[in-house]
Amino acid sequence: MSSSDDKTTHFGFQTVAEDDKAGMVHGVFTNVASKYDIMNDVMSVGIHRVWKEAMMDWLAPRDGQRLLDVAGGTGDVSFKFLGRAPGASAVVCDMTESMLVEGSQRAEAGNMADRLDWVVGDAMALPFADNSFDVYTISFGIRNVTRIPDALKEAFRVLRPGGRLMVLEFSQLPNDGMQKLYDLYSFNVIPRMGKLIANDSESYQYLVESIRKFPNQERFAAMIRDAGFENVKYRNLSMGIAALHSGWKI
């Protein structure tokens, strides 16, 4: 029988030991933390902000809800959630402390300090009790998790009955020709942007490769159902460059 040391996964297009991936991902986001928000704007021409607003439209935040935003980085999603529901509260959870530090220094964080907490934690082993949250979100982070099914099971565990999961992630275009054009842009332009703006092309090469390795919309929806969620649906954004997946803990 194989030991856990023999298990492998992908880090972009590389095959690596499962035990090594988390540290490698941590290194990527530590390297890009100070330029992360700028690079998101440049890479998506600002469209990631529109996608996050679409996420909020579907979520319809309400006062009294408690949000857990996993891989929440610099806090974008939590800020938007609390902006729409001033009587709600949120926890930003990320395994990269430097990302949380960047977020906590933003003006929005100061304005929402009484409703917002920042916690270092692993999506596959969340440091929270069962049935603790009304809403769980993860944006552009699930593809970086070593074992996605484990992260989805943890999401199910920490949500209260009636709680909702929503995932925003890069996905697959339905047309092969369009996908090839998008890949040309991704692989040729984004790492060069990373070099120019963040002085780090390798981290952005990984990010592009990780998008291509992520399951398509239907496969990922099936993984959410396997974790126990019901009424699972998805919506394509920008023709499938990204997608929102929603599920409920019934």
Image (cartoon, rainbow, N blue to C red):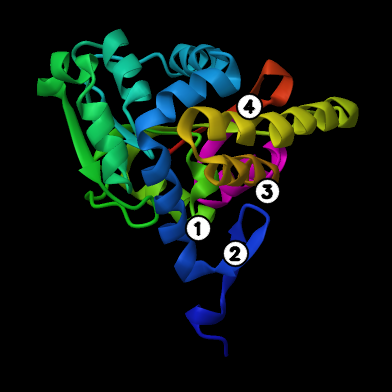
Q: Residue at x 22, y 42 (%)?
A: 119
> How many angstroms separate mark 4 from mark 2 (CA)?
23 Å
Q: Which residue is mark 3?
A: 213
Q: Residues within 10 Å of mark 2 (few under 14, many from 20)?
A: some
Q: Residue at x 30, y 18 (%)?
A: 79
Q: Which residue is mark 1?
A: 146
Drawn side of residue 138 relative to residue 204, left or right: left
> How many angstroms separate mark 2 from mark 3 (CA)?
11 Å
Q: Where's residue 220, x and y in %?
A: 63, 43
> How many angstroms separate mark 1 from mark 3 (CA)?
12 Å
Q: Where's residue 173, x and y in %?
A: 77, 28
Q: Secondary structure at mark 1?
A: loop
Q: Where's residue 15, x and y in %?
A: 64, 65
Q: Secondary structure at mark 2?
A: strand
Q: Is residue 245 visible?
A: no
Question: Type of residue at label 1?
Answer: Thr
Give the mark nearest the N terminus, 2 or 1.
Answer: 2
Drawn side of residue 29 relative to residue 147, left or right: left
Q: Residue at x 59, y 70 (%)?
A: 8
The answer to whether marks 2 and 1 mark residues whose Cβ atoms lie closer than 8 Å is yes
Q: Which residue is mark 4?
A: 242
> How many angstroms separate mark 4 from mark 3 (CA)?
14 Å
